[in-house]
Image: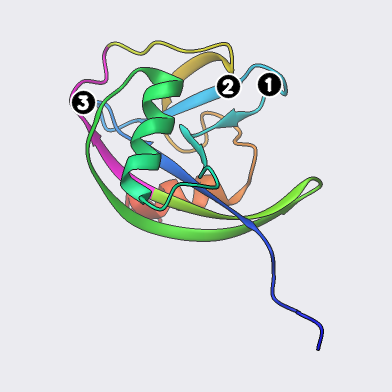
Amino acid sequence: MADNHLNLRVGQYALIRNNQGKILALRRSKSGLWSLPGGRLNSDERDWFGALKREVTEETGLEITSAKPISVEIVDDPYQVKYCVYFAVICSDTNNINLTDEHSEYRFADPGEVEFEYPHIEETIKEYLNYK
């Protein structure tokens, strides 16, 4: 019998707010598109919180103190299908961001101030911030 189950990857992404309530956005160096901090789980990772902490620290230098899942979306783009799990995140300090070569710039933004790589990200942010 053929296996008809969907094979996909899992990514986790952080909604990090600064003191003004704006969300951290990162511009990808290769594509120039805006994204949230985070990324796919490695094949050996089973700890969501640990994987999210790893990704956020790698990409921004920030240290997560707590995270709560708030939304899940399935993304189907030209090179992969993945579950995107979004977390409301608290960091110990959002003033000292250190980007790697993966991102060229960062910005704390309100919804609509940057165009994210996936349209549903803005809706997720609006829901999180209780925008209508």
In terms of secondary structure, where does tag 3 sit? Answer: loop
Q: Which residue is at 28% across, 40% downward?
A: 89
Q: Which residue is at 69% across, 76% downward?
A: 5
Residue 91 on the magenta span: yes
Q: Is residue 51 left or right of residue 39?
A: left
Which one is earlier in the sequence, the residue at label 1 or at label 2?
Answer: 2
Which one is earlier in the sequence, the residue at label 2 or at label 3?
Answer: 3
Residue 27's label in the rendered image is 2
In terms of secondary structure, where does tag 2 sit? Answer: strand
Residue 35 on the magenta span: no
Residue 34 in the image: state x and y as whole percent. Answer: 59, 29
Residue 8 in the image: state x and y as whole percent. Answer: 66, 59
Q: Distance between the residues labelled 2 and 3?
A: 21 Å
Q: Distance between the residues labelled 1 and 2?
A: 6 Å
Q: Magenta residues?
A: 87-95
Q: Which of marks 3 and 1 is in front?
A: 1
